[in-house]
Image (cartoon, rainbow, N blue to C red):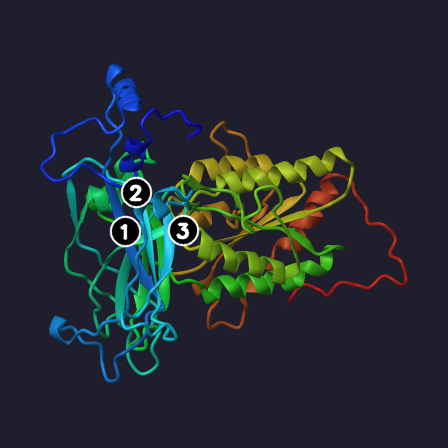
């Protein structure tokens, strides 16, 4: 502290190295600092800390089953440290190895992580009833045995488990017993409002081996959950599958065809409807986690960025297309200013109905003058009737909120469920109108093709 304390002994006591003897009269432990604080109406040197504990990689001592009777519990290990070792670290966390009391240091008993945080002064508690519907089945011969784990995100960006529900056996639509959490558990002084502190809810399939399978996760807050309780439909916050097969199928199918029409095979990959730690919901963010650059290499790069985002970004509503379409239109517009004849294709994959229908219409009408097309795939069981308006297959072009009519049709929308089991693949359905959209733009600008070079490798034709 640069020698600014006049009372070294008091400073030591303030961090837990000592204290007044039992029965001693109360006294100011640090005269200089205490006088400074009190003269300005501030509190003293002390604050109340909450310690959170989480254990991992514990040694399994059970042979047949997990014992729930406390009288039959086995000792795993112990760890000790000074409080100052925790609070002086930037993350206010430390991880310790569990040691056996009998000195068996060779045995790996696991680790325990301790996090210290200044407590929130409130007696408020929240009771919740949590449920999931249509969970992915992780078991082969029976249904999943789901349970939930709730964690809060602390100042360092790491997550601390605060609650775990009971396991419900053989059930894909579980409803758990009521969960009660205090503000001290879910709140944080790092947020302006305790109810806005980010929470992570993870759904696991229980395995007796202790290696539980992650079914899905989401990031939310107590404020969001309270709003959810007042609404009739909370579908946007239900746990989603970690990797939807339909999403992969659409990305790979369309990407493997279109990549041959891009000389360097580098693509811009964005996500929308995602909440990043300590941030609000973003409706256009770089899928690869790089704040500066959104380009990835090939279809493999898209899939890699997609997989990484599923683990680092929590899905969140509402579903907005406008920001992504405007971003793509901005890039297409810049290409016109450089006189480079490029045509852009925006592929959007969504599992929810958009809530910014008019804003999306406005963005599409504005983009209809640009060298771009928009392919939209709807996955899952949502009602996509409203979104079919975006695909002007009825011959009626879109109209913006200002009355402007789209120059041409640039959207193709395909619900995945409509083509499953049919002779037409989702790729064929998506690309069906693309050649016509491409030609209509080129003809409107009197752009003719360059002479083909004899040695140039030809791209494959669109699927028939």
Tell me whether circle 2 and circle 1 mark residues in contact (CB < 8 Å): yes
Extreme residue toward the top, this view: 39
- Secondary structure at numbered mark 3: strand
Report which quarter residue 433 is drawn in: bottom right
Report which quarter residue 213 is drawn in: bottom left
Q: Which mark is residue 372?
A: none
Q: Foreground residue, 91 or 343?
A: 91
Image depth: mark 3 or mark 2 in front: 2
Q: Foreground residue, 447 or 173?
A: 173
Residue named by callout 2:
117
Residue 348 visible to an observer of this rendering:
yes
Residue named by callout 1:
52
Badge 2: residue crowd in 10 Å (few <14, some 14–19, many ≥20): many
Q: Which mark is residue 314?
A: 3
Extreme residue toward the right, this view: 454
First along the sequence among labels 3 and 2? 2
- Give the Cα separation between the discs numbered 3 and 2: 24 Å
Residue 396 visible to an observer of this rendering:
no
């Amino acid at each position: 502290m640069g020698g600014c304390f006049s009372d070294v002994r008091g400073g030591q006591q303030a961090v837990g190295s000592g204290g007044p003897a039992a029965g001693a009269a109360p006294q100011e432990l640090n005269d200089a600092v205490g006088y400074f604080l009190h003269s300005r109406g501030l509190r003293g040197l002390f604050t109340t800390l909450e310690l959170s504990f989480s254990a991992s990689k514990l040694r399994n001592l059970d042979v047949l089953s997990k014992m729930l009777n406390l009288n039959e519990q086995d000792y795993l290990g112990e760890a000790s440290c000074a409080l100052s070792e925790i609070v002086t670290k930037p993350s206010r966390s430390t991880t310790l190895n569990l040691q056996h009391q009998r000195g068996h240091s060779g045995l790996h008993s696991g680790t325990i992580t301790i996090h210290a945080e200044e407590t929130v002064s409130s007696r408020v508690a929240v009771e919740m009833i949590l449920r999931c519907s249509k969970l992915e089945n992780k078991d082969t011969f029976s249904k999943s045995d789901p349970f939930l784990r709730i964690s809060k995100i602390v100042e360092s960006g790491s997550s601390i488990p605060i609650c775990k529900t009971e396991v419900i056996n053989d059930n894909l639509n579980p409803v758990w017993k009521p969960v009660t959490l205090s503000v001290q558990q879910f709140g944080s002084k790092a947020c302006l409002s305790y109810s806005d502190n980010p929470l992570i809810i993870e759904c696991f399939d229980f395995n007796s081996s202790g290696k539980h399978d992650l079914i899905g996760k989401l990031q939310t807050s107590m404020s969001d959950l309270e709003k959810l309780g007042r609404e009739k439909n909370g579908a946007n916050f239900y746990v989603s599958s970690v990797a939807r097969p339909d999403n992969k199928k659409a990305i790979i199918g369309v990407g493997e065809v279109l990549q041959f029409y891009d000389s360097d095979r580098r693509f811009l990959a964005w996500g929308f409807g995602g909440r990043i730690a300590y941030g609000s919901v973003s409706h256009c963010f770089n899928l690869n986690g790089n704040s500066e650059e959104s380009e990835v290499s090939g279809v493999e790069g898209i899939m890699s960025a997609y997989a990484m985002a599923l683990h680092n970004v929590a899905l969140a509503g509402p579903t907005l297309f406008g920001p992504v379409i405007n971003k793509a239109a901005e890039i297409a517009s810049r290409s016109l200013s450089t006189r480079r004849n490029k045509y852009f294709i925006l592929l959007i994959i969504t599992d929810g109905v958009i809530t910014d229908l008019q804003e999306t219409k406005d963005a599409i009408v504005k983009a209809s003058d640009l060298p771009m097309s928009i392919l939209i795939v709807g996955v899952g069981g949502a009602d996509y009737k409203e979104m079919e308006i975006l695909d002007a297959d009825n011959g009626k072009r879109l109209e913006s909120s200002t009355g402007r009519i789209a120059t041409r049709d640039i959207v193709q929308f395909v619900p995945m469920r409509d083509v499953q089991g049919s002779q037409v693949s989702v790729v064929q359905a998506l690309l069906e109108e693309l050649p016509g959209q491409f030609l209509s733009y080129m003809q409107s600008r009197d752009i003719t093709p360059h002479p083909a070079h004899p040695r140039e490798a030809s791209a494959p034709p669109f699927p028939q």
